[in-house]
Amino acid sequence: MNVVAFPKPDAARAILQARDAAILDGISHRGVAAAVWQRDPLPEFTQRIDALPVHQLPRLRTIVAVGSVAPCVHAACDLAGTPQDQFRDMLAGDITVLAEIMAEVMDAPMMHLRLDVVTTNACRKFHIDNKTVRMLCTYRGMGTQLAQPGQEAAPMAVTTGSVALLRGRRWPGERTGLLHRSPPIEGTGGTRLLAVIDPAWDFEPKDRSQA
């Protein structure tokens, strides 16, 4: 396990990283602002997702019980015309696993689940979400960028396929100091497919933030 620690004790700023899903449990440790499960997606999966036309990438915003995540993802894929193949099954299955992890770590059986297709500089400013905690996984395109205040010019990028669990402003007790943003891609021709999972208790109908 790698721990990137920072000296200012006034807010949680540490980033935990490991190639084991168990690292995500570390989000509750004192001083930890983010936990990153480092993953390398299968090349065949990445090639298939990257090759899909933008209009065939699924878009979704819903509150859902953990056990219903896969059907919701497949319904979104049906609406987008995403081909019915093993790679679509892998996407739905993986998002289900992430929701199950969130449910266990946060004791939250209901999720606000989003699948965002990003082609602009959405949420390009570094910020802290007004949430308790947020899980992010980029399946296509550049991953979310993390930065300490004052170090925004040299952010750390979460790799594509890796899972980031980030504390937000509503985290109880300890203030969070780590910033993040959606990488600026407008004008590059790039596209991101981003899964965002929040505990349902943090749901706000007007929430349009991306990362």
Image: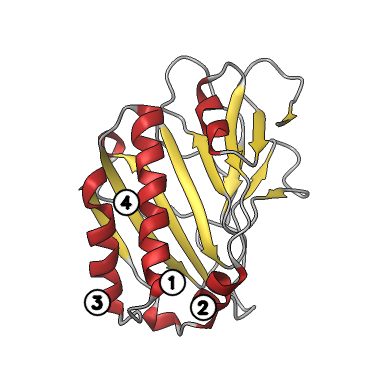
The answer to whether residue 53 is left or right of residue 70 is right
Using the rendered image of the protein, determine whether residue 65 is visible from the camera's viewpoint: no
Residue drawn at point x = 36 percent, y = 67 percent: 89
Amino acid under disc 2 = Arg
CA neighbours of label 1 inside 10 A, class few (<14), some (14 to 19), many (20+): some
Amino acid under disc 3 = Leu
Q: Residue 21, percent across and down?
A: 54, 38
Amino acid under disc 1 = Phe
For the residue pair 43 and 80, the one nearer the viewer reads as 43
Q: CA distance from mark 3 to mark 4?
A: 16 Å
Kindly report which numbered mark, 2 or 3, lies closer to the viewer in this rendering: 2
The answer to whether residue 152 is left or right of residue 25 is right
Q: Residue 1, percent across and down?
A: 70, 31
For the residue pair 98 and 153, the one nearer the viewer reads as 98
Instruction: Describe the element under mark 1 as helix, strand or loop.
Output: helix
N-terminal-most mark, 2 or 4: 2
N-terminal-most mark, 1 or 3: 3
Kindly report which numbered mark, 1 or 4, lies closer to the viewer in this rendering: 1
Residue bearing mark 4: 113
Q: Residue 168, percent across and down?
A: 47, 33
Instruction: Describe the element under mark 2 as helix, strand or loop.
Output: helix
Q: CA distance from mark 2 to mark 4?
A: 23 Å
Q: CA distance from mark 1 to mark 3?
A: 17 Å
Residue bearing mark 1: 87
CA neighbours of label 4 inside 10 A, class few (<14), some (14 to 19), many (20+): many
Q: CA distance from mark 1 to mark 4?
A: 20 Å
Kindly report which numbered mark, 1 or 3, lies closer to the viewer in this rendering: 1
Residue bearing mark 3: 79
Residue bearing mark 2: 48
